[in-house]
Amino acid sequence: SPVGGASAGFVPLQKTVTAILAAIRHKANPVMLDFLPVSEGVEDHATQTPLAVAKCAEMIVLWRRLIALELMAAAQAIDLREGLTLAPATGTIHAAVRAHVPTLKEDRPLGPNADALHAVLADGYWRPAVHQILLA
């Protein structure tokens, strides 16, 4: 936070990040813990593939949310460093974040900003820009 002191700044988001990381770790547990014989013993076990795919899809949503929060924090850190010159690719990403999330100048609820950035990541809005950066 540019204010410091009693200002919360991005501190409340740390709890959200921690909860998301815990959920990702929980979903990363192998589904093979549910080892059940199938086909009246003809097959050793069911692979639980549909469950593994569903868990992976849920993890991708969580990772997108985590990336949105990390992008917000990174953009804020850049904004707090006066006179900083960014590399072109970093500048592109910073500008894309700032197109959806304003710089934090005083405490405000950050949930709506995080939701907006998560939605942008989820809808593929940045795919062309990221692809162009990766090819550069």
Image (cartoon, helix red, strand yellow):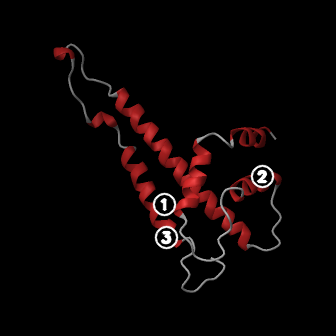
Amino acid carrying label 3: it is Pro
Disc with the residue nearer the chain's start (2 vs 3): 3
Q: Quadrant of the N terminus?
A: bottom right
Where on the picture, by quarter, is residue 110?
Answer: bottom right
Q: Is residue 83 left or right of residue 10?
A: right
Q: Which residue is mark 3?
A: 12
Report the residue at 52% width, 62% height from top.
Answer: 111
Amino acid carrying label 1: it is Val
Give the secondary structure at mark 1. helix
Structural distance between the alpha carbons of marks 2 and 3: 27 Å
Disc with the residue nearer the chain's start (2 vs 1): 1
Looking at the picture, does residue 75 appear above or below residue 123?
A: below
Where residue 45 appears, x then y in whole percent? Answer: 25, 23
Q: Which residue is mark 2?
A: 92
Q: Local crowd at mark 3 within 10 Å, few (<14), some, or many (≥20)?
A: few
Whether tag 2 and tag 1 are in contact, CB under 8 A, the answer is: no
Q: Is residue 38 left or right of residue 65?
A: left
Q: Local crowd at mark 1 within 10 Å, few (<14), some, or many (≥20)?
A: some
Give the secondary structure at mark 3. helix
Amino acid carrying label 2: it is Thr
Where on the picture, by quarter, is residue 101?
Answer: bottom right
Whether tag 2 and tag 3 are in contact, CB under 8 A, the answer is: no
Looking at the picture, does residue 2 appear above or below residue 43?
A: below
Any mark on residue 98, and which? none
Give the camera-side residue of 9 and 116.
Answer: 116
Q: Which residue is mark 1?
A: 17
Give the camera-side residue of 43 and 114.
Answer: 114
